[in-house]
Amino acid sequence: MRLFALRGASSVDRNDPQAILGATEWLLREILKLNDLHPSDVVSCIFTLTDDLNAEFPAVAARNMGFSQVPLLCSREVPVPGSLPRVIRVLMHYYAPVNHVARHVYLGEARVLRQDLEGAQ
């Protein structure tokens, strides 16, 4: 086993607790599925939100999904003028077999953030 890190992001249609929790859960479920992971494999997650999202912490969705023993951190994204609005990002650290290939996940409008990874999804 070795330590890996991957990135992911999802767009949110509105600044609402349920929208933030739903987008975060969708993102985490896709990451877990595509990388054949379980919450027990995860070492830590760092979530960022754009300035226009403040109705809920993405970590709440992770906790609801069983990430109860995983250190989680929520923070603000740098508000670069013209950047994509209403986005939740995650940096996830996890253990997997040495031959594992990390599959990054970008959902919804956030897909435009990393079109270079499109073939990996």
Image (cartoon, rainbow, N blue to C red):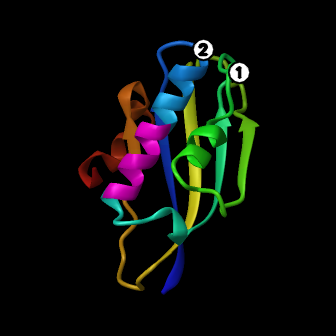
Earlier in the chain: of badge 2 and badge 1, it is 2
Asked if labels 1 and 2 touch by Cβ distance under 8 angstroms, the answer is yes
Q: Amino acid at mark 1?
A: Asn
Q: Is residue 84 visible?
A: no
Residue at (39% x, 25% y) in the render: 109
Direction from residue 93 to residue 25 in the image, left or right: left
Image height check: is 29 above or below 70? above
Direction from residue 51 to residue 93 in the image, left or right: left
Name the residue tied to disc 1. 54
- Is residue 114 inside the magenta stretch? no
Q: Nearer the viewer, residue 120 or 96?
A: 96
Segment colored magenta: 25-33
Name the residue tied to disc 2. 15
Direction from residue 107 to residue 77 in the image, left or right: right
Direction from residue 34 to residue 20 in the image, left or right: right
Residue at (39% x, 31% y) in the render: 112
Query: Which of the 4 image quadrants contains residue 17?
Result: top right
User: Marks 2 and 1, how far apart in space?
Assistant: 7 Å
